[in-house]
Amino acid sequence: MAFDGWEECIAALLGLSSGRPLLVVLDAFPYLTAATPALPSIIQAAFGPRAAPRRRSRVRLILYGSALTFMSRLLSGDAPLRGRAGLELSVGPFDYRQAAAFWGLETPDLAFRVHAIVGGTPA
């Protein structure tokens, strides 16, 4: 699929839902916004309470980015997306004990080695 702009893309996303909720994730959102500074405003307009496509859609949009300062500014002050979020969630890395439990590792030595290589991000 090819779109002429983000307005068309977001409208198409909102049209995807067919009864059941549909989860859509926009990864690397700070980079997308750097390329298209109006993107938060486009999303605001599409997901506004009076936007017709939004009222019919069951799409749930997750905006993801590892630039925490940028992401927190999206929902603050007079930012376009203020008031549009249902949840703001910051996910931190596992410590080596949590990672060991996630991977099912029982020996501390192996848990330490796996954490040293993979880090605290779950698979």
Image (spheres, helix red, strand yellow):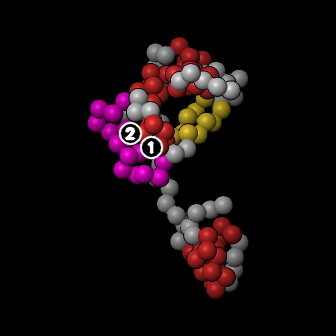
Give the secondary structure at mark 2: loop
Q: Quadrant of residue 71?
A: top left
Give the secondary structure at mark 1: helix
Residue closest to the eye, 3 or 104: 3
Say whether residue 96 is magenta: no
Which residue position is annotated with label 2? 74
**Looking at the rendered structure, which numbered label has been put on residue 30?**
1
In this rendering, is residue 27 above or below 84? below
**Extreme bottom residue here?**
109
Q: Where, quadrant-wise, is the C terminus in this rendering? A: bottom right
Residue type at tag 1: Pro
In this rendering, is residue 19 above or below 30? above
Q: Quadrant of residue 4?
A: top right
Expressed as whole percent of the image width and height from the top left, the position of residue 16 reads: 67, 24
User: Does residue 74 appear in this view?
Assistant: yes
Label the magenta part by its dominant secondary structure: loop
Comes first in the chain, label 2 or label 1: 1
Expressed as whole percent of the image width and height from the top left, the position of residue 26 reads: 55, 39
Q: Give the Cα distance between marks 2 and 1.
A: 10 Å
